[in-house]
Image (tube, rainbow, N blue to C red):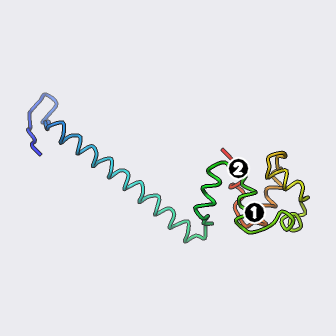
Amino acid sequence: MSVRFQMTPQGEVAILPRKDYDELIAKAAEFDEDAGTTRIIERAKADIAAGALLLPKHVVDRLADGENAVLVLREWRDVTQTQLAASTSINQQDIADIESGRQEASAVTLAAIAHQLDVPLDLFVQD
């Protein structure tokens, strides 16, 4: 890297070839990305140590793809609609309608489902 220094009214500046500048910018961006990844990993480690729920990638992918969270999480927990209905006192047809989008679940219903599936209620809330 060839750098030339020059005095200006604002102080000394470094002048370098565009190629060298672009390489420095790329390295800085890589460093920022690495630092961001490190923060995410550290937060995940803290969440895991605190007992946070870990979802398998295939479950996260299905949720991210917009599939119905009740359906995805129920299947992940290997619970049938009939079993979920019996354990929550929610009609099985209502569960089917919620999963298909024909019916919107109340907060009380979602709380009962979340409790039975042992997942945080916020997994059912979409942005």
Residue at x-position 91% and y-position 58%: 91
Residue at x-position 23% and y-position 40%: 22
Tell us which disc is closer to us: 1 or 2: 1
Q: Amino acid at mark 2?
A: Val
**Residue 68 location (% of width, % of height):** 73, 52
**Residue 118 location (% of width, % of height):** 73, 67
Disc number for residue 125? 2
Residue at x-position 75% and y-position 66%: 117
**Residue 79 location (% of width, % of height):** 78, 68
The C terminus: image quadrant: top right
Mark 1 or mark 2: name the one nearer the start of the chain.
1
Q: Is residue 21 above or below residue 121?
A: above
Disc number for residue 74? 1
65 displayed left or right of 29: right
Q: Secondary structure at mark 1?
A: helix
Q: Amino acid at mark 1?
A: Arg
